[in-house]
Amino acid sequence: MRYKMHKTVKSIELTSEELRKMQMIMLEMLIEFDRICRKYNIKYSIDGGTFLGAVRHKGFIPWDPDADIVIMREEYNRFFEACKVELDKERFFLQDYRTDKYYRWGYARIIRKDTEYVRAGHEHMNSKNGVFIDIFTMDSVPDSNILRRMHRFMCFCIRRTLWSEVGKKVHPNFIKRKWYGILALISKNWIFKFRNLLAHQCNKNKNTKLVRHMCSPHPKNHPYGFPRELFNSLREYEFEGFKLLGFTDYDWYLTSIYDDYMMFPPVEERSSHIPCSSYKLTEPKL
């Protein structure tokens, strides 16, 4: 998520060599994720800038400091169970609200152990940190226009309430910092219970036209979600010399997010959108 931060929040930038090293650490986790999914026949797609990187660069976008995966809820539940026996726990940690009691985000992560990556403004958070990849979980969206609007609003409320623990520190507006401070008093356990109840109710219908990740904003062109049919057809894409899965209709998907996705952004915009305040990298094992 891109947002302006309070002027007291300080960040540092990685050198190009350090960023490349971090990308190779993320590649470790992508390979491990893909290994487990293929073994258990779990469907997923690379997402966002990771998908764009695969199509445009056959790997990471040179200035991109993160990696994203998207997966349906039922597939993620299978992956979660598989990780109990399959995940290389010497190197990796699967993080969600069930495995880390301090974790507040509505999507999962795989963290590389023996690393550190603290997002600027998140220094007070007690959840485990490190170089990570994000795993966004998709849920059904109601087909009714009225229910879609209600669903989108509830997703917004869930997302903002979970983010409130950060917002009360970093939001540049004094009034909004105070408002987030009030929201932060709501137990995250209650928020996740509500999120899970909403997801359960929506997922009773596995044939809705749209699906969405409930705890992350969607692009303006698709405010309610993406077509479910995207998940019906996947193919392999070359990524840093390895093969990862993505939606077959990459052109529609990337155009819907980035418009002319093959065009490079201006030089001044080729920078990290995830500022950090401290980091420690380890040697990747590929």
Image: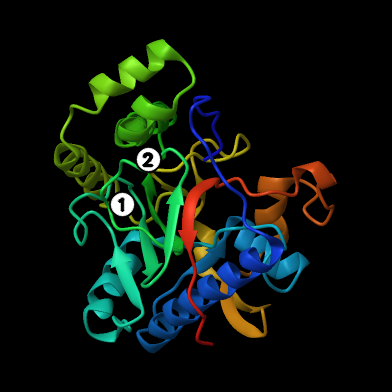
x, y percentage for residue 278? 47, 52
Quick check: 231 left or right of 266? Answer: left
Which is more toward the observer, 197 or 178? 178
Mark 1 belongs to which amino acid? Answer: Asn
The residue sitting at the top extreme is 175
Instruction: Please identify the quarter of the rendering in which residue 36 is found.
Output: bottom left
The percent position of residue 71, horizontal first and vertical second, equals 42, 63
Residue 115: x and y in percent read 42, 68
Whether residue 153 is visible to the viewer of this picture, yes or no, is no
Residue found 31% across the figure and 51% down from its top: 205
**Above or below, 250 relative to 202:** below
Q: Which residue is mark 2?
A: 142
Tell whether 271 sits left or right of 111: right
Q: Residue at x 31, y 71 (%)?
A: 93
Amino acid type, label 2: Pro
Residue shown at 43%/81% (left/top)?
32
Q: Say whether disc 2 or disc 1 marks the residue closer to the N-terminus.
A: 2
User: Helix, strand, or loop for circle 1?
Assistant: loop
Q: From the viewer's perspective, is 85 left or right of 240? A: left
Mark 2 to mark 1: distance in Å? 8 Å
Q: Is residue 28 left or right of residue 88?
A: right
If the image is split into quadrants, where does the C terminus sit? bottom right
Above or below: residue 111 compared with residue 220: below
Q: Residue at x 83, y 47 (%)?
A: 267
Density class for disc 1 (Cα within 10 Å; few <14, some 14-19, many ≥20) is few
Write down the residue under mark 1. Answer: 205
Residue 134 appears in view: yes
Q: Residues within 10 Å of mark 2 (few under 14, many from 20)?
A: many
